[in-house]
Image: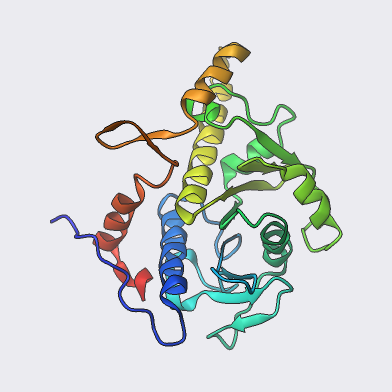
């Protein structure tokens, strides 16, 4: 039986309706990252900017698996790392997560969501001198892929400026010898970006491991494809477009609800 799409429901008294809706989305994002095999035990992080003037953002408690994340379990911290809401006695924020996410949320107010992963395919491509190649239509989706050289575990606040400068206006960044990072104007868009980036890395490694010469599309074809893929068409409405991630998000939530709707709690 197909699960019915459910509304998040009324927000608990300690959260506004807007924040609760965002919490449900980010919790769903964590569950989807887990389902698609993009986790690294309890490590890595996804964050979302809380609506309002206070520059707060949501992030995972460092110690929970992604499959355990729920809307109410997410931490709320300010841009300086102070905990605004933490329901846990034993868990706090991952320091590297704070350095990366606070830098981007502070510098780029248009970014709502940031996702960072350590997948085998992402780490492998991050270690290749060539980086991500536009070998497939999926990889050509990204008009710009940013790169940030490895400086050690991201704990030094001085690295934040270089991280932001290297990200620029790109939606995705490969952290050399480290992993992948994606941003988006919504949770939906950021998840789609990290999913597509991960898939691009995976297919590149499969192609490179086959031992056959690679077919490299011409630069003008790559540019044209990127322009064609810049927005996806809306269902049933020719000429109408939505950002990537928006059209498929309700279906992904129905999938989650059919497996385990506890992320909504």
Query: In this rendering, would 29 be left or right of 84?
Result: left
Q: Position of residue 250 (x, y in %)?
A: 31, 53
**In the image, residue 183 above or below residue 83:** above
Q: Which residue occupies 53% across, 18% down? A: 224
Q: Position of residue 101 (x, y in %)?
A: 67, 61
Q: Which residue occupies 70% across, 38% down? A: 146
Q: Nearer the viewer, residue 211 or 127?
A: 127
**In the image, residue 111 above or below residue 15:** above
Query: In this rendering, would 90 be left or right of 146?
Result: left
Q: Which residue occupies 57% across, 54% down? A: 115
Q: In the rendered image, is residue 69 in sight?
A: no
Q: How is the image coloured?
A: rainbow
Q: Nearer the viewer, residue 41 or 54?
A: 54
Query: In this rendering, would 106 be left or right of 73?
Result: right
Q: Which residue occupies 70% across, 47% down? A: 178
Q: Quadrant of residue 114?
A: bottom right
Q: In the rendered image, is residue 235 in sight?
A: yes
Q: Nearer the viewer, residue 109 or 7?
A: 109
Number of numbered discs overlaid on the protein picture: 0
Query: In this rendering, would 239 be left or right of 136?
Result: left
Q: Position of residue 152 (x, y in %)?
A: 81, 54
Quadrant of the image containing the N terminus: bottom left
């Amino acid at each position: 039986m197909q699960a019915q799409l459910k509304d998040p429901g009324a927000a608990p008294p300690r959260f506004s309706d807007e924040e609760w809706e965002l919490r449900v989305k980010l919790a769903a994002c964590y569950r989807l990252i887990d389902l698609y095999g993009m986790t690294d035990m309890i490590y890595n992080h996804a964050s979302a900017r809380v609506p309002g003037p206070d520059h707060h953002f949501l992030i995972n408690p460092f110690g929970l698996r992604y499959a355990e994340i729920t809307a109410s379990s997410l931490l709320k911290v300010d841009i300086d790392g102070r905990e605004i809401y933490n329901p846990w006695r034993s868990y706090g924020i991952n320091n590297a997560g704070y350095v990366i996410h606070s830098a981007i949320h502070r510098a780029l107010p248009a970014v709502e969501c940031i996702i960072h992963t350590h997948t085998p395919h992402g780490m492998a491509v991050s270690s290749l001198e060539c980086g991500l190649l536009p070998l497939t239509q999926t990889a050509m989706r990204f008009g710009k892929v940013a790169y940030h050289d490895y400086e050690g575990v991201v704990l030094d606040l001085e690295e934040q400026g270089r991280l932001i400068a290297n990200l620029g206006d790109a939606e995705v960044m490969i952290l050399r010898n480290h992993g992948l990072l994606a941003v988006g104007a919504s949770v939906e868009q950021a998840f789609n970006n990290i999913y597509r980036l991960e898939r691009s890395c995976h297919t590149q490694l499969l192609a490179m491991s086959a031992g056959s010469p690679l077919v490299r599309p011409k630069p003008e074809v790559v540019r044209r494809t990127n322009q064609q893929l810049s927005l996806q068409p809306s269902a049933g409405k020719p000429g109408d477009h939505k950002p990537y991630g928006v059209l498929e998000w309700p279906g992904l939530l129905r999938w989650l609800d059919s497996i385990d709707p506890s992320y909504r709690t």
